[in-house]
Image: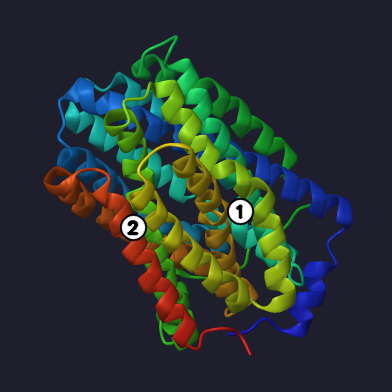
Amino acid sequence: MSLSAEQSSTADATPSENRTTLLITLAAGHALKHVFNAGFYILLPEMKTALGLSNAGLGTISSVRNVVGGLANLPAGYVADRYSARFGQVLALVMVSIGVFQFMVGRSANFSQALIFSTLMLVAVSFWHPPAIGAISRTFVRRRGFAISIHGTGASIGEAIGPFLTGGLLALVTWRVLLQWSLVPAVIAGVLVWVLLKPRKRVVAPAISFAAYTRSFVGLLTNTKLLAVLIIAGGFGAAQGVTFTFLPVYVREDLGQSPWVVGAYVSLAQVVGIVSSPIMGHLSDNWGRKAVIIPSVFGLGFGLLGLYLVGSGLFFLIILGATGAVLFSIMALILAAGADLVAEEFQATSVSMMYLVVILFTGLSPVIAGFVADEYGVRSTFLMGSGLALAAGTFGLVARWQRE
């Protein structure tokens, strides 16, 4: 299922001004989505205290919401490919839904309600990537790695701003009020996305029945190269899930820092990625995906090992920044590698498969890491994340998965 020359020329024929508007709008929307998502992780220590949770309980919340959010990628991929012509309207509804469910988390009175609404929030988040990256992948065929990385740069910007902004606002308001306020920018962003990405002419979505989609989805699972990319994505996702969940807890509890400083630490991990992501995407378009992805995954593994060994201080901050240079760049490159292996009409489906695997492993790893943290200390989760990333890098190094 490779992209044909005819499909490539059709995709690249899109007027440049429309392509620019599309890419900027999607990158900006992606940034705001990650402001919400990254900010939520900064709220976890405060929620842990308010709800009286153990590390295992906190890991359970992270795992349940990520597993359910991962499974949501299956219908998200179908919706995105079936209604690809209306991807802008789908994304507008996604943005508003994220705000609504964050509002409900802020209204939650107990653990069960927080778990339910935070999970639904991540379900909404899962519906962003397939239509957004599917549209980018179909539009920027020859520069797919660079364009998806620009979209990923939006994520890095959001991940840099979100923790810093959230930590600062926690000095002024409670975590409940902050989550409820987030509904306002979500609705405004939803309206803007609806207007900016509204089709300028009447278009008809491809008539893909659910049965045909299911058969094609199963067929993709026989693609051994795609399966290899999924394994790499799973190892990366597991390491990412451990890091995102317990880095804020480590800085807040073990290092004894304020919520504002917690936000600053997590933001630092993303700032370098704003610059590195498009550079790495450009390099992968010219040098090949494997030549860039594998060193990046190894870099993540050794970076997390460095955080474990150093523990605190200036070198901890330096290593944290270096680790952030690859943390979000890797996901964009993996998405491009998967998109290289499937046909145009299944671009969103390949994205949903990648995120399904990544989010499932991102969801499973924190609950295991939570038990490890309760037994050996939160710092030990860096060692666990390092092992997962290094294993993924080793597999990717020896496996044959790059497009010929």
- Residue 356 located left or right of residue 116: right
Question: Percent from the top left, x then y, of residue 46?
Answer: 29, 24
Helix or strand or loop: what does disc 1 sit on? helix
Name the residue rendered at 33%, 43% in the picture.
245
Quadrant in which the C terminus is drawn: bottom right
**From what the image shows, is residue 30 above or below residue 177?**
below
The earlier-in-sequence mark between 1 and 2 is: 1
Residue underneath mark 1 = 132
Q: Could you say where residue 301 lies in the image, as x and y percent from the top left?
A: 42, 62
When asked about the image quadrant of residue 281, the answer is bottom right
Color scheme of the displayed model: rainbow
Q: Nearer the viewer, mark 1 or mark 2?
A: 2
| Badge 2 element | helix
Q: Residues under labels 1 and 2: Cα distance?
A: 29 Å
Q: Pointer 2: residues within 10 angstroms few (<14), some, or many (20+)? A: many
Q: Amino acid at mark 2?
A: Gly
| Closer-to-camera residue (180/324) | 324
Mark 1 belongs to which amino acid? Ala
Q: Position of residue 253 (x, y in %)?
A: 27, 30
Question: Considering depth in this image, is 6 or 224 the residue closer to the camera?
Answer: 224
Q: Please tell me how crowded label 1 is: few (under 14), some (14-19), or many (20+) other residues with Cα within 10 Å.
A: many
Identify the residue under disc 2: 385
For the N terminus, which image quadrant?
Answer: bottom right
